[in-house]
Amino acid sequence: MDQIAEELIGKIIHEKYELIKELGRGSFGIVFVGINIDTNQIVAVKCESTKSKKRHLVNENTVYELLQGKEGFPVIYFYGKWEDFEILIMEYLGPSIKKLFYQCNNKFDVATVANLAIQCLYRLEDIHNAGFLHQDIKPENLTIGDMDSDRKHIIYLIDFGTSTAFKDIETGVHMEPGEASRIVGTCRYAALRMHYGYICSRRDDLESLGYSLIYWLQGSLPWQSVRESDPRKKWKIVRSIKRQYIIDSDYLKKLPEAVQDFFKYVQSLGFYTKPNYRILRGIFRRLYKQTKEYENRKTKPYCWVKFLDSMKRPRIPSKYR
Ligand SMILES: Nc1ncnc2c1ncn2[C@@H]1O[C@H](COP(=O)(O)OP(=O)(O)O)[C@@H](O)[C@H]1O
Ligand SMILES: [Mg+2]
């Protein structure tokens, strides 16, 4: 795909969107920065080869369509075929939370984590209410809004490549528990049930959010340094460490009480249960209110705000300026 990406730079999709540079790359496609040459608006373009065996983008577009108009999900401008690719053109967002975490020296303060949790819980409530699970909640799949807009303090949830419906769209009936046909997501943040190969439900997206919260507070997760090239073995090793830390040990007791309460609540949820997102947001609102950032209202709720001016938004090529 390396060479393909380079060859695509400068190409114009359907006489409207020029590809400017590569933005990111995942397991099944490439994301580019593009420009709408009619309006000079910067956009993000996700491409997937029509030759690839597993097709994710069509599924991703379905979920994005369901979430259009909701806060914290990018606007979709186009989905369709172009040459040998499926193309999804969407609103250009700001840097990912992973990138902002590195900017902040791999640690977020409690106020930042509490506000991230509140925003993520709104996003999860919306996708779950649309009948889908995300199944890959992690810092790379969360971003802030476009830095040149008033949406820069909104947290966006992206990447629905591994999303799946947990209800029958027509009847609204919840799927039955059982063994999953395949393991999806990211080993570091996956819920334990995914590690065991079971079908996941709403509570498991929350569990992955929980691991992200711990990661942001602690700067690392106890299982992140497992080096194992065989993915099956790695998922198994990480599973036992995760289990030990999250279920059997005192590890959670060292974290803010809000995080312990969050895990306790998530662990109490049944397979079919609709989580009470409002109660969970309440836990983190109370946590935020206890921080010095809340008392000193001049401080913004996110610790990365001071770095935003130094982070560059892609430049519009001079021919379009
Ligand atoms: N709309 C967007 N605006 C800005 N950056 C984006 C956008 N969509 C994706 N990205 C960046 O590209 C990366 C990969 O995109 P993602 O949708 O997560 O694809 P993958 O399935 O390859 O992980 C993201 O982590 C993010 O940094
Ligand atoms: Mg991703």
Image: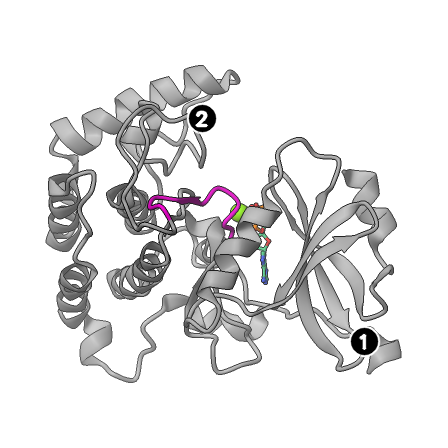
- Chosen colour scheme: one colour
Q: Secondary structure at mark 2?
A: loop
Residue placed at 84% from the left, 52% from the top? 8
Disc on res. 65: none
Dividing the picture into quarters, in which one does residue 135 lie?
top left
Residue placed at 54% from the left, 51% from the top? 60
Between tags 1 and 2, which lies in front? Answer: 2
Dividing the picture into quarters, in which one does residue 226 lie?
top left
| Distance from the alpha carbon under mark 1 to that under mark 2 | 41 Å
- Residue tagged by mark 1? 37
Q: Is residue 280 magenta?
A: no
Q: Nearer the viewer, residue 312 or 15?
A: 15
Q: Is residue 303 visible?
A: yes
Q: Nearer the viewer, residue 150 or 288?
A: 150
Q: Residues within 10 Å of mark 1 (few under 14, many from 20)?
A: some
In the image, what residue type sits under mark 2? Answer: Arg
Position of 150 compared to 200: left or right?
right
- Residue tagged by mark 2? 182
Q: Nearer the viewer, residue 102 or 97?
A: 97
Q: Position of residue 287 (x, y in %)?
A: 15, 64
Q: Is residue 298 above or below residue 145?
A: below
Q: Position of residue 2 (x, y in %)?
A: 78, 39
Q: Position of residue 101 (x, y in %)?
A: 44, 55
Prevailing secondary structure class for the magenta stretch in the rendered image: loop
**Dividing the image into 4 quarters, which one contains the N terminus?**
top right
In the image, what residue type sits under mark 1? Answer: Ile
User: Which residues are drawn in magenta?
Assistant: 158-168
